[in-house]
Image (cartoon, rainbow, N blue to C red):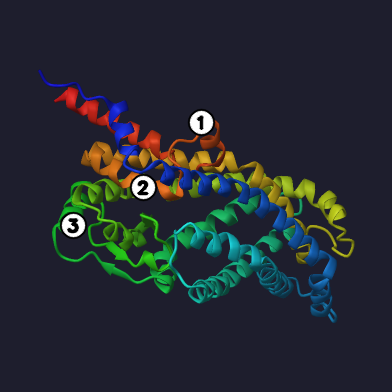
């Protein structure tokens, strides 16, 4: 008599592939990351206070407006200078959070010089787009004083959509080398998967993600004609077999097929409206608390540090909501992979390889508050439940 498949036992067996010390290390890394949210918030407040007290932005605004008002130029230049000063003052924290800590936990082999060079390149790109965004935002604040926050959500949606379109074409190739998946079983399988589900089959790439991170990962990026699926070379360095590739790429195809990037961007733009509404009400008291006496109200770009603190508070409080939004999309992508490609064991094997940077069995409360992906233990259990249901159906 055939033995009944037990999803719980199968899940436990997959999790047991890692020794207890590996799970303990993953838990320490993950829970330490929760504390980074608080410490990062405090760093933002401290840096913003230092910039306000220095008077550098107010001084720049005054020099630019010495002869006549120049609101557009002031918005751009003050915004860019603020971003540069903020980046420089926050650099020690960023080094610890994004490079040193990753190095200590074995999640990157990137040299510090390489990491810093990429950060400088990212800063240059961010400065341009942030400057343009702030020009438009402060124009809205000046022209629509009582409703600027409402229009601000649309502005955010426009910039996010533009970013989704241009990032895979012009920005991501600056940091990594993307090459078409080589001929062979992997590419043939992925092309067949794409064609069978109405997904473009000419944008399947492998990229050298191991330059920055040892994490086992893949991603979908872009929108409309620029969208593509990209697999980090770490997948194959960690021995991904064809079942894993089908499961992971199927997950990424789920993101594309269900337009998760655009859906999330739309919801976040709606949340931006709420955030800007609260900024409109909280800016003056926050300005007083930071001692920004020389800032001439919300429409003054010299008040960007104040704006940053208010948004940092709102972002910290909204973390459970935004994390839950992403978790919903990730769960949906898992289900898409299982329904269309039926590789529950491939998905489980791949998920086990992500435990080192995302502890597998958090409490439900911890998951809801801090996790932007469903917990690995729950994802594997869902895959095993699917396997059991599929077996009963056949």
Image quadrant where residue 133 sits: bottom right
Q: Total marks drawn?
A: 3
Instruction: Please identify the quadrant where the C terminus is shown.
Output: top left
Q: Is residue 250 above or below residue 185?
A: above
Q: Is residue 383 above or below residue 253?
A: above
Residue mark closest to the camera, 1 vs 3: 1
User: Which of the two labelled residues, at mark 1 and mark 3, occupies the earlier sequence position?
Assistant: 3
* Nearer the observer, 16 or 210: 16
Instruction: Where is residue 368? Give x, y as percent.
Output: 53, 35
Distance Cα–Cα, label 2 vs label 3: 20 Å
Q: Residue at x 84, y 56 (%)?
A: 290
Give the residue number, with chain letter if any, for mark 3: 186
Task: For mark 1, give the secondary structure.
Answer: helix
Q: Is residue 66 visible?
A: yes
User: Is residue 357 shown left or right of residue 310?
Assistant: left
Q: Tell me, yes or no, whether the two marked residues, 2 and 3, touch with CB atoms within 8 Å.
A: no
Q: Residue at x 79, y 52 (%)?
A: 283
Distance Cα–Cα, label 1 vs label 3: 36 Å
Give the residue number, with chain letter if any, for mark 1: 364
Instruction: Where is residue 198? Give x, y as percent.
Output: 23, 49
User: Which of the two labelled residues, at mark 2 and mark 3, occupies the earlier sequence position?
Assistant: 3
Q: Is residue 342 above or below residue 168?
A: above
Q: Is residue 257 visible?
A: no
Give the residue number, with chain letter if any, for mark 2: 255
């Amino acid at each position: 008599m055939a033995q009944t498949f037990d999803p719980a036992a199968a899940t436990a067996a997959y999790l047991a592939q890692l020794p207890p010390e590996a799970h303990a290390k993953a838990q320490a890394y993950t829970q330490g990351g929760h504390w980074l949210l608080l410490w990062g918030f405090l760093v933002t407040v401290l840096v913003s206070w230092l910039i306000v007290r220095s008077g550098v932005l107010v001084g720049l605004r005054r020099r630019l407006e010495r002869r006549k008002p120049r609101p557009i130029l002031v918005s751009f230049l003050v915004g860019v200078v603020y971003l540069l000063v903020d980046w420089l003052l926050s650099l020690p924290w960023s080094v610890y959070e994004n490079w040193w800590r990753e190095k200590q936990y074995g999640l990157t082999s990137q040299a510090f010089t390489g990491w810093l060079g990429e950060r400088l390149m990212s800063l240059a790109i961010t400065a341009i787009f942030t400057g343009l965004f702030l020009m438009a935002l402060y124009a809205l604040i000046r022209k629509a004083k009582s409703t600027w926050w409402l229009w601000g959500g649309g502005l955010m949606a426009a910039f996010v959509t533009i970013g989704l379109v241009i990032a895979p074409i012009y920005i991501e190739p600056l940091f990594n080398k993307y090459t078409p998946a080589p001929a062979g079983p992997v590419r043939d399988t992925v092309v067949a998967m794409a064609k069978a589900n109405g997904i473009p089959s000419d944008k399947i790439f492998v990229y050298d993600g191991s330059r920055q991170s040892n994490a086992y990962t893949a991603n979908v990026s872009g929108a409309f004609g620029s969208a593509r699926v990209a697999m980090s070379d770490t997948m194959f360095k960690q021995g991904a077999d064809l079942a894993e590739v089908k499961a992971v790429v199927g997950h990424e195809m789920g993101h594309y097929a269900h337009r998760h990037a655009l859906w999330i961007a739309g919801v976040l733009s709606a949340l931006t409206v709420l955030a800007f509404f609260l900024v409109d009400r909280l800016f003056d008291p926050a300005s007083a608390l930071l001692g920004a006496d020389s800032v001439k109200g919300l429409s003054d770009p010299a008040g960007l540090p104040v704006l940053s603190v208010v948004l940092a508070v709102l972002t910290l409080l909204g973390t459970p909501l935004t994390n839950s939004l992403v978790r919903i999309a990730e769960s949906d992508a898992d289900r898409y992979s299982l329904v269309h490609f039926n590789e529950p064991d491939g998905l489980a094997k791949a998920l086990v390889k992500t435990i080192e940077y995302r502890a597998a069995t958090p409490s439900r409360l911890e998951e809801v508050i801090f996790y932007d992906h469903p917990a690995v233990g729950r994802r594997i259990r869902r895959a095993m439940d699917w396997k059991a249901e599929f077996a009963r159906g056949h």
